[in-house]
Image (cartoon, helix red, strand yellow):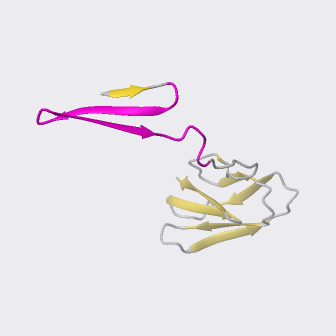
Amino acid sequence: MWNESLNRIFNINLSIFGVPLTEAYALPTSVLAAKEIQAGSKLSAFPVPTNKILNVMNPGNGANKIEIFDVTGKLVTNKSFSASEGKISVAVENLPKGVYVYKIGNLSSKFTKN
């Protein structure tokens, strides 16, 4: 049976083969670690799935090139862009149907080509 007291000490009361056993555990009540979410830490693309053009919002992470890889890791296309561009459009109509990974700097995500 779990018991919680107000000071964050947990008591565990067990009975093993008729022998009572009580253990007390103190658990930390503060945050041990938190991942900070920063602007520009996620890629966003549309439409997904796509047929002809993949539009990717510029994450503003200082990179100036988008790279697209197939599922084997082969670079199939890339495009340079200006850091001031809000939206990056990449022609993907010549790519075969499938799943691809796109990368801008150290960020990556995937999309499906129909």
Q: Is 37 a magenta residue?
A: no
Q: Which residue: 49% across, 66% down?
A: 71
In the image, taking residue 92 as reference, residue 84 lies left or right, namely right
Looking at the rendering, which quadrant does residue 82 occupy?
Answer: bottom right
Residue placed at 60% from the left, 73% from the top?
Answer: 75
Q: Quadrant of the N terminus?
A: top left
Depth check, front residue: 40 or 95? 40
Q: Is residue 29 magenta?
A: yes
Q: Is 11 situated left or right of 98 in this image?
A: left
Which residue does the image show at 46% across and 39% down from the upper left? Answer: 26
Tally of numbered tags: 0
Residue 43: image location, x then y, percent: 67, 52
Does 4 sit above or below residue 106? above
User: Which residue extends farthest bottom?
Assistant: 74
Relative placement, left or right, of 73 versus 19 is: right
Residue found at the very far right of the displayed protein: 84
The one of 114 and 70 positioned closer to us in this rendering = 70
Q: Is residue 97 above or below residue 29?
A: below
Please name the residue shown 65% across and 70% down the image. Answer: 77
Does residue 53 lie above or below 47 as drawn? below
Q: Is residue 31 above or below residue 110?
A: above
Q: Quadrant of residue 92?
A: bottom right
Instruction: Report x, y in % for residue 35.
Output: 64, 49
Q: What is the magenta range?
A: 6-33
Residue 74 coordinates in the image, percent (x, y) = 55, 74
* Residue 97 % position (x, y): 50, 59
Of residues 68 and 109, the one nearer the viewer is 109
